[in-house]
Amino acid sequence: MSKNHHSIDYVEFPGGDLSATKAFYSKAFGWTFIDYGPDYAAPANAGLDGGFQADPDEAPEKPLVILYSNALEQSLAAVEANGGKITRTIFEFPGGRRFHFTDPSGNELAVWSDQ
């Protein structure tokens, strides 16, 4: 598989409680993981390559990654039902709607939809 110049290729997050983080994404979004030792796990089917770094000496700053949803309200419900904390409820912006949440490790993400 060839890489596209200047396109997003990988996103790395601090892992914090790696077990809780993996459980959250598995339950809320159906992701599976590949473990690379006790401190690192990579989502295998998240749509973009990335990983969770649980070693606090190696963890990056917390980025904001925006996920896409075909059913925004259902995504929000799944986040809440699986331990995510909504930090900004659904709001409109030019081109769509989105909400922000934090996962069990404190990473803030957003989910948007143009539907």
Image (cartoon, rainbow, N blue to C red):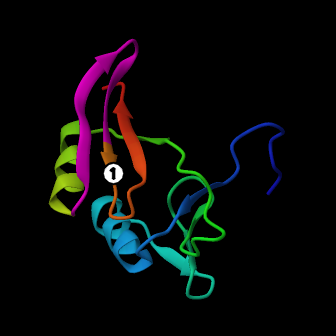
Q: How many marks?
A: 1
Camera-side residue of 54 and 40: 54
Residue 94 spot, x, y in % from top left: 39, 12
Q: Amino acid at mark 1?
A: Thr
98 falls in the magenta region? yes
4 falls in the magenta region? no
Would residue 82 appear left or right of 19 to someone viewing this image?
Answer: left
Residue 27 spot, x, y in % from top left: 28, 68
- Asked if residue 9 is positioned above or below residue 93 in the image, the reply reads below
Please report the residue visible at 55 percent of the width from the left and 59 percent of the height from the top: 13
Residue 91 spot, x, y in % from top left: 25, 23
Q: Secondary structure at mark 1?
A: strand
Mark 1 neighbour class, 10 Å CA radius: few under 14, some 14 to 19, many 20 or more: some
- The residue carrying mark 1 is 102
Residue 58 spot, x, y in % from top left: 66, 69
- Asked if residue 21 is positioned above or below residue 8 in the image, the reply reads below
Q: What secondary structure do most residues of the magenta stretch adopt?
A: strand
Magenta extent: 83-100
